Amino acid sequence: MNRKELYQLLNTELSRPGEADDGAIAAAILHFIAANSGPKGLTELTLICRHIARQRGIQNVFNLIKRLEVSFSLRKPALAIYDHTLHLIGGAQKYGCTVAHALQDDFDITLIANKPVRHQDLQNWYQLDLSRCRIATIPIPFYEEQNKEHLDPASVTSRRMANPFHLISLESGRYDFFINNSMVEMVFPMANPSLFICHFPERRPSSYFYVDRYQHLIFNSRYTAEWIRKKWGLQPGIHIYPPVDMNGSVDFSAKENIILSAARFDPGGNKQQLRMVKVFKELSQRQPRHLRGWKLILAGGSPLENQYLDNIRQSIAACGLDNIKLQVNLSAAELKGLYQKAKIFWHLCGLNQSEPELVEHFGMTVAEAMQNSCVPVVFAGGGLVEIVENNVSGLLFSSQGQLAQKTVELITQPRLLQSMGERACQRGKIFGRGVFETRVKEVFGKMLNDYRLAE
Amino acid sequence: MMENENIKKSLQELKNYYAAERDKSQDIDELIKEPLDREIIIDFWKLSNAEIEREMWNRLSILDADADCLPGGPLPSRRSFLGKPIMIIKKLVRRLTAPYSSMLLQKQNQLNRELVTFQLLTFLKFRHLEKRICAIEEKMVDFPDPRQNEPQIEKRTARKK
């Protein structure tokens, strides 16, 4: 490509603000430099950059130069993953960290957090070696003043308040790829390409909503995709189910008569453990013969002070049953032990709820239980119906009565319980970490090829 | 090899230059040469119960912040040359009309405060009602109406016959 042709292309593309093809511009410049790498050609590059900066801004030129560096294989591409709650353990955080784990060979990865977090913490929480990733902590003054552990994006209520995430938007522009894994719609992506991982659209578009400015929208379940369309009016792009890695060697004969629930003791009561206690109590009274020898174990994480957890304790005490146990803040190994011992898994999140965000968006613990041949009896809604195939790899219910009835069906038919447990185990494998990482590598491999302007 | 070194050096120099320029300007609109923000219109009819509640809280806090309509602080001036005489006139007008306007504004202020308080109370009343409805719904789940399971007698058909 000669100088004249290059300028012709530049002028055509730059005359279309908002629609200019950055890839075509970068490819043309790349070919021009490759053919004219002498002093004259490189001086021309300086002039081209100045020309683009005038028309499209400094960030656009900066992105172009970064892309040329990667395309000439002068360095590895830099990728940043932002998560405002990286310092707290959680399913969404595990998702982002597993993406980093899958890509750390091909990218220089920076995990951007707002509060300090160590590699060792991430290793302990998710069993992921992220030693090749850098962690950058960027405190946000607005939230530092509040001195709270959780940075709540909903506290920015109107455009009268300055956007506290402006700092992160500016930081995003330093990298080749930027992934927003934090569900903070107020971060404007300045890198190109940019990806927004949506775990669920919690808020409607309001002040500082920039999700539509990201080039790719990744979603974790079809349920989430449906609500992205309804709440944001956006078309979700890439579907990647969350990584679930609880696979273990399971001997069904060694299992005990345990109904297990593993879910956070959410202070708002969204996971409905209190209702589980009620149902179990009712079942024990109505079907004492069938329920003899069965235990209900409620496992999950909780903050130190939790009124909802206290209510559950009181309810258990009031029942007078000694076969309902609470196991709070277990280690991953202890939880795995419970999955291996339990025969049935209950998950009620979403039952009798009218708000879509209170229904399970995916349900990682359900897939974890299935990987350990635990038969799921779960609410027929949200992302749960994507995990469990009714009457094949588990049972779905829509009411409290159905939950009781289906549980008794399983308890009274040991053969059905075992065969369904085996099928649940098979089904659970499709949500494994290996499958997740392969998919992530495939998606990003293609993006990287495009970015590198590989012919 | 030499050519690659030249390219590397040039790109590095350009990158350093634009990185410094980028750091100098913290204004995103300027960096991307387009306005970042646009007006987003909320379709209130599509909001869920929880979203309506959130929106009510947000609006209430805005109303509360804006309730005070008494003039406070110095008058702003954006003009460089004409600024001073215009400011003098503004101050004069403000002082002349002060006795009458401050009486009206104080009345308005009082009304605003009362309205904000009234809105808050209405909101709290809604909350109490909602809690009561939730408690009733919860009881209905625990003790479903036994008549629901009884066979339905089709009275109308029987009458026709």
Image (cartoon, rainbow, N blue to C red):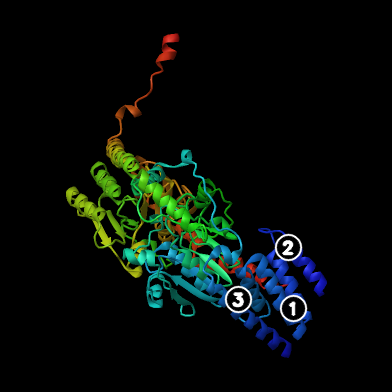
Instruction: Say which residue label 2 marks.
Output: A13
Q: Is residue A364 left or right of residue A434?
A: left
Labels 3 and 1 positioned on one and the same chain: no
**Front position among marks 2 and 3:** 3
Q: Give the mark toward the camera: 2 or 1.
A: 1
Residues tagged by mark 2 and mark 3 found on one chain of the structure:
no
A191 in relation to A420, above or below: below
Question: Could you say whether the residue bearing mark 1 is in a helix, strand or loop?
Answer: helix
In the rendered image, which residue does mark 3 sit on? B18
Q: Quadrant of the N terminus of chain A?
A: bottom right
Q: Residue at x 82, y 74 (%)?
A: A2
Question: For residue A167, which numbered disc appears in the image?
Answer: none
Where residue A174 appears, x then y in whole percent?
55, 73
> How far apart in space, not on screen, are marks 3 and 1 (Cα)?
16 Å
Res. A44 mark? 1
Q: Is residue B74 above or below residue B12?
A: above
| Marks 2 and 3 close (CB-CB < 8 Å) | no
What is the CA distance from the residue labelled 2 to the residue labelled 1?
18 Å
Going by the numbered disc 2, the residue's amino acid type is: Glu
Callout 1: chain: A
Residue B101, position in %: x, y?
35, 41
Q: Are marks 3 and 1 in contact (CB under 8 Å)?
A: no
Nearer the observer, A360 or A400: A360
Q: Residues within 10 Å of mark 1 (few under 14, many from 20)?
A: some
Between A123 and B157, which is closer to the camera in this rendering? A123
